[in-house]
Amino acid sequence: LCRLYGGGRLGDDMRRDMGFLAAAPLERLAPPALLLYGNRSPNIEAGRGLARRIPGAALKIGRGNHNLPVQSGAWVGRRLLRFFSSQAPMA
């Protein structure tokens, strides 16, 4: 199996982390949250679940898989710019 930092095994770490999102108190997060996922990401359902649980979260789905920033860098950059521009305090 693939080794991770600290000598752990990938499968062991994944099993240990199962249920983490289900148990985390995500409803208490202060908005805003931007969630970016690729339309072919194996984790897109987790993103949809996070969007339902985090108040005010914005889920944006671009073209790509789990390597979305590499595959659709310009798209990611535009989404980040819009998100952070909308969060800037009014002068």
Image: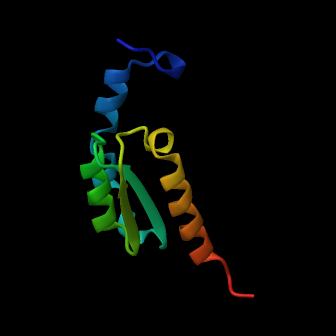
Task: Name the foreground residue: 65 vs 29.
Answer: 65
Query: Looking at this view, is 34 or 80 the one in front?
Result: 80
Q: At 68% from the left edge and 82% from the top edge, which residue is drawn?
A: 89
Give the residue drawn at x 34%, y 40%: 65
15 in relation to 22, above or below? above
Q: Position of residue 59 (x, y in %)?
A: 36, 63
Answer left or right for 80 relative to 19.
right
Q: Work out which quarter of the rendered image holds the N terminus and state it.
A: top left
x%, y% of residue 7?
Answer: 49, 15
In what quadrant of the picture does the C terminus appear? bottom right
Q: Establish if 34 lies above or below 36.
A: below
Place of residue 60 in the rendered image (x, y in percent of width and height, measured from the top left): 38, 61
Question: Residue at (32%, 54%) from the top-left corner?
Answer: 47
x then y, percent, for residue 5: 53, 21
The quarter of the picture where residue 17 lies is: top left
Q: Residue furthest bottom?
A: 91
**Residue 29 in view of the camera:** yes
